[in-house]
Image (cartoon, rainbow, N blue to C red):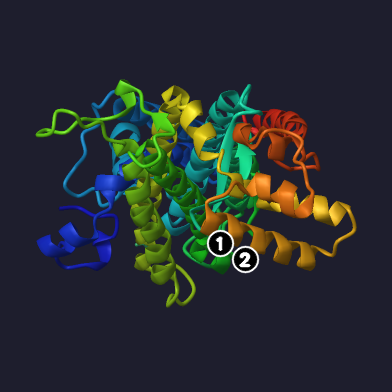
Amino acid sequence: MSTLWSGRFDSGPAEALWEYSESLSYDRRLAGDDIAGSRAHVKGLKRAGLLSGEDADAILAALDQAWSEIKAGQFDFDRGDEDIHSAIERRVTEIAGDAGARLHTGRSRNDQIATDLRLFLKRELAGTARRVLALQEVLLARAEGEEETPLPGLTHLQAAQTVSLAHHLMAHAWGLSRDFERLMEARDRADVSPLGAGALGGSALPLDPEFTGGELGFAGVFDNSLDAVSDRDFVADALHALAMVGVRLSKMGEEVILWASDGFRYVSLHDEWSTGSSMLPQKKNPDIAELARGKAGRIIGALAGFLTTLKGLPLAYNRDLQEDKEPVFDALDQVNRGLLAMGGLYDTLTFNRERMSEAASSEYLLAIDIADVLVNDGTPFRKAHEKVGALVRKAMESGESLVALAESDLGIVLEVTPSSGAASLARRATRGGAGPEAVRAQAARLTARLADQRAALPD
Ligand code: ARG
């Protein structure tokens, strides 16, 4: 087996070492970015006078050919290809001969892999952000027209105060909006070129990291070569941004599970986005939502695992860093699929507005409204709370109506019938509140935010 480093060694690597250390089985996913990095490097070498125009052209053509072969699934990977960098360099040398042997001049796989991964994440994080935006759009669309659909808002999973279905759905959208921003911030972190840092100390050759960084479209260039090859903060940032999406989808999933359950029956799921039971014919299960909840575990695990990998590392490159790729790939794949699946689930579920209304019709949800009337009449809130609390107890013990008791005992007549739940809602008109007017204003703000986010995405 021939390796990139065979000169210094008497024998080839042991089989078990190879099995343990190869990364080609997964880092081939970086092939396109590796080729892009090599193209920029070749141009840099030519510009520095380290490659003749002829050699540079031969290498660039060989890189193109290797990339075509990879895309067509016709690239012959070799047992000796330790990683995607070795595989491509070997192939380029096969195609371009001596010129190919000049490709790695002034470069190390240490700055090469950091470059590849940054290019990869810049693209992928924008792709995930695009999906986050799409899910927000689904929620916004589903919220439209539901500004007056009453829903019991819960605290401690106990009915607390009526909100509207639109308000509730948009609450998730705002969370996703922050997730979008976090992903784009992580993308900005990745947007710094490490190419030219070499193995760890830069190069004595007249390379120009600013030129190659610019060729690759990076917004910035490294300032310290040791930092450039060992920095994986951008990977941790990406994993954190992804984990936050994973947690969001998990929480949204948990809610769909509850809402579809027999106790709630707030929603029914579309056949295309739910599953059945192999034994029990009547079952219709919210598997997507459960998987969103379950997969959050492994996505969080990717972040926790990778931070643990990083925490003991001295400067600069250590092979431990190879462990950055699998968690990133897996977290990205899981989050991307989860976003699509949850989008389909939310887009197609049917709201059972009657059930929501019925659940929001408990008079106890009006307790705070009664207290608010007292406060508006000048009663200190703490006293009002005490009075209404006693009234609630009386209603519970006697089985009488709370609204009727408010009138008989406190002289308070609530303007609208409590059964609609709308009474309480309509009174809450302040910014960000649950009342229909406030919710319409909120929807306009969310619409504007989504337009800004769409504009921030690369083409
Ligand atoms: N496959 C390696 C990684 O992913 C590439 C860098 C290897 N560098 C080295 N000096 N062994 O990190």
Name the amino acid, label 1.
Answer: Ala
Quarter occupied by residue 267: top left
Name the amino acid, label 2.
Answer: Asn
Task: Please give left or right for residue 295 compared with residue 343 in the image.
Answer: left
Q: Identify the residue at horizontal 35%, vertical 60% (top origin).
A: 323
In terms of depth relative to the viewer, which is nearer, 313 or 398? 398
Residue at the limit of the structure toward the right, as seen here: 378
Is mark 2 in CB contact (under 8 Å) with mark 1?
yes
On whether ligand 1 comes within 8 Å of the CB at mark 1, the answer is: no
Q: Quadrant of ligand 1?
A: bottom left
Q: Position of residue 142 (x, y in %)?
A: 55, 25
Q: Identify the residue at horizontal 16%, vertical 58% (top origin).
A: 19
Q: Identify the residue at horizontal 65%, vertical 53% (top origin).
A: 221
In terms of depth relative to the viewer, which is nearer, 440 or 295? 440
Measured in 3D between alpha carbons, the distance from the residue under mark 2 to the one under mark 1, in whole angstroms, is 6 Å
Numbered tag placed on residue 228 in the rendering: 1
Q: Is residue 187 visible?
A: no
Give the quarter of the figure containing the C terminus.
top right
Mark 2 surroundings within 10 Å by alpha-carbon count, few (fewer than 14), some (14 through 19), many (20 or more): few
Q: Position of residue 366 (x, y in %)?
A: 66, 47
Numbered tag placed on residue 121 in the rendering: none
Q: As displayed, is residue 382 above or below residue 112? A: below
Q: Which residue is mark 2?
A: 224
Q: As displayed, is residue 49 above or below residue 113? A: above
In terms of depth relative to the viewer, which is nearer, 8 or 148? 148
Q: Is residue 205 visible?
A: yes
